[in-house]
Amino acid sequence: MTLNAENELPLVRHWIDGKPSDTAPERVGEVYNPATGQLKAHVAFASPGEVDRAVSAASEAFSSWRRSSLAQRTKVLFAFRELMAARVDDLAAIVTSEHGKVLADAIGEVSRGLEVAEFACGIPQLLKGGYSEQVSTSIDVHSLRQPLGPVAIISPFNFPAMVPAWFFPIAIACGNTVVLKPSEKDPSASVFIAELWAEAGLPAGVFNVVHGDKVAVDRLLEHPSIKAVSFVGSTPIARYVYENATRAGKRVQALGGAKNHMVVLPDADLDLAADAAVNAGFGSAGERCMAISVVTAVEPAGDELVAKIVERMGRLKVGDGRRGTDMGPLVTRQHRDKVASYLDAGLREGANLVVDGRDVSVDGDADGYWLGPTLFDHVRPEMSLYRDEIFGPVLSVVRVPSYEAAVKLVNENEWGNGTAIFTNDGGAARKFQNEVEVGMIGINVPIPVPVAYYSFGGWKSSLFGDTHAHGTEGVHFFTRGKVVTSRWLDPSHGGINLGFPRND
């Protein structure tokens, strides 16, 4: 849509070269409060020319930022970390107002992003190379890692603060410059973060934000000055980003979708497992790539486990995330309606609808994008409830006869992002972690998101590219390695030898 000159709503602007862009946008998007259904702001949509302007600012800043000392970079990183820690509540409130997740969840999101900033503060240790003296007569070898250049980060709506923070602290710490394209559904957190970077003393142009849709994304993917792309989103778009960016010669890490299973063995603590299924299935209204969407109950655990899950679901309070509720709305009306359509599909396909989220009583505005926690039992793998990534508060229970059947179910699934097993049998847990074909595994932990100094990423259709996010893999992604072989000759050396050099 085009912005009307008489419009009085706030405009979320791009952040380019250290300040908000003052260019009048040709197109804008709409930003809603999901808890009220009210339009709260417009967001500028970048044209290819505006993307070029942000990349140009990043390219110009790179020439000096890459030469900055590690001491200078860490000074800025520590300052940013302190500012972000002091403003956690403010940033969380922005996330809640545009995404809809409850404040406690938003605070947790910001805190997990803060962990990556803390990890990046240790960049001098992380960038240390190796040195070998006298590998051959009078010859030494050492290694080093250097930044790539301007990099692009394309992040999703479900974690507008945390997911970008998986990437930009490390990219900046390694000496790169950044162009962030956040989701147009909840863009304000990215601008708030840009302001914190400026306050921390980050030079203009090192961190830029452009808003928009496919037009902005495509220009970033093809731009010759962008050296690497980090993406998180659905599998079809991750595949699109990977194919187009690699075709343009870029380094890519594209994290896709998921269908995460929680396997519950009969010996498990079923109270603990039921708590975990509810927490991991309905937190953030199920809009998490690490949400548990399938509970794989190994019989005879099914009946008792389902009863315990239903009892806990009955205690959940759904409503405006600012009011102390347990679960908020979905992010948009269109997404709410898409998720709700799976309830009808599940019934048509013969699943047992145990708890219908359409009947939920809500503590919030009637125009919010509400769908309560929903539970299906006796779901079969051929059903759309199981096949599709629903990305909402819909939990499916698949019953299997044995541990072997549970592992087979997980391994035959298209995705391999996260999984969990609940058991009191250490041998079964160890066997599971070795046999299951999934990138992140929880043992009696339902959402096994690694801490910042380990790396985040899945297998199969959950990841395109070879490198996971943050941790040491993140440092390697945002740098290139060099190996230097040197010989400093003493004054007495001389002579000619055309033979192939040997390691004597």
Image: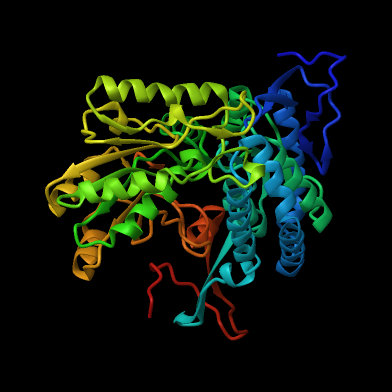
Query: Where is residue 398 drawn, in percent x and y?
Result: 23, 40
Query: Where is residue 439 drawn, in percent x and y?
Result: 35, 53
Q: How is the image coloured?
A: rainbow
Q: Quadrant of residue 465?
A: top left
Write the residue at 54% across / 71% down.
129
**Depicted 281 relative to depicted 435: above or below:** above
Quick check: can you spot residue 504?
Answer: yes
Instruction: Quarter of the image for the N terminus: give it.
Output: top right
Write the residue at 12% across / 47% down.
401
Q: Quadrant of residue 378?
A: top left
Q: Quadrant of residue 53?
A: top right
Instruction: Quarter of the image for the C terminus: give it.
Output: bottom left
Looking at the picture, tell me which residue is in the foreground, 422 or 69.
422
**Depicted 96 relative to depicted 128: above or below:** above
Does residue 53 appear to the left or right of 408 in the view shown?
right
Write the residue at 56% across / 33% down.
362
Write the residue at 61% across / 36% down.
99
Query: Where is residue 61 drawn, in percent x and y?
Result: 77, 47
